[in-house]
Image (cartoon, rainbow, N blue to C red):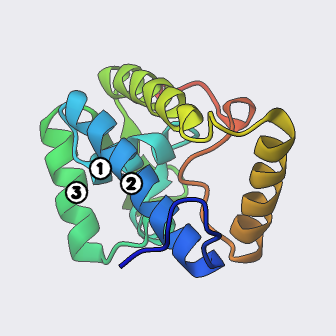
Amino acid sequence: MGKATGEPMSVVTALVRSSFLVNAVYAESAREYGLTPQQGQLLCVLMSQPYGMTELGGVLGLAKSSLTGLVDRTARTGLVRREPDPRDGRAARVALTEEGGRIAEEFYAETCRRIELLPSGLGDADSGKLAELLGRVVIDNEVPAVFMELDERAPAAQG
């Protein structure tokens, strides 16, 4: 059984449970946009720039076959497209379509709104400390920029 309400959790329990919480919000938001959570991640990553398949696989942590399927399914819905890589004529990059950019912006904003509500029971000081500590964990573990700060993003439409 779990600990009684109000008892401190270990860092492991707190991190695992919080990841489930964020994943649930992400999945709910994606579902409302007709996306899978993986498609939502793909769109958010592509908001900053087009990526080559190898680089994209690294950012999303997907094997080549899984990434190819994800890109193919998302391209069929008209949200992403493959385009020639200007640096390597044999390679392709994945970019948002105009519709994909619109959906990505809306999905991103809605997901941020929902996630911002999660720590609403904390005061400003505690929220700031939580962000600082989690930010350090993310940086120390070199987590790819799957979800970025608003001021770090480039315009969504890639063409």
Tag shown at residue 84: none
Question: Along the horizontal axis of the image, is 22 left or right of 62?
Answer: right
Question: Along the horizontal axis of the image, is 126 left or right of 91?
Answer: right
Residue highlighted by disc 3: 70
Determine the secondary structure under disc 2: helix
Q: Residues within 10 Å of mark 3 (few under 14, many from 20)?
A: some
Upstream in sequence: badge 3 or badge 1: 1
Looking at the rendered image, the quarter that the C terminus falls into is top left
Looking at the rendered image, the quarter that the N terminus falls into is bottom left
Residue 81 rendering spot, x and y as whole percentages: 29, 40
Upstream in sequence: badge 2 or badge 1: 2
Query: Would you say the residues marked 2 and 1 are in contact, meaning their CB atoms lie under 8 Å apart?
Result: yes
Tag shown at residue 37: 1
Camera-side residue of 146 and 159: 146
Determine the secondary structure under disc 3: helix
Mark 2 or mark 1, whichever is nearer to me: 2
Residue highlighted by disc 2: 23
Residue 7 rendering spot, x and y as whole percentages: 61, 68
Camera-side residue of 53 and 5: 5
Camera-side residue of 138 and 2: 2
Q: Residue furthest front?
A: 4
The disc labelled 1 sits on which kind of residue? Pro
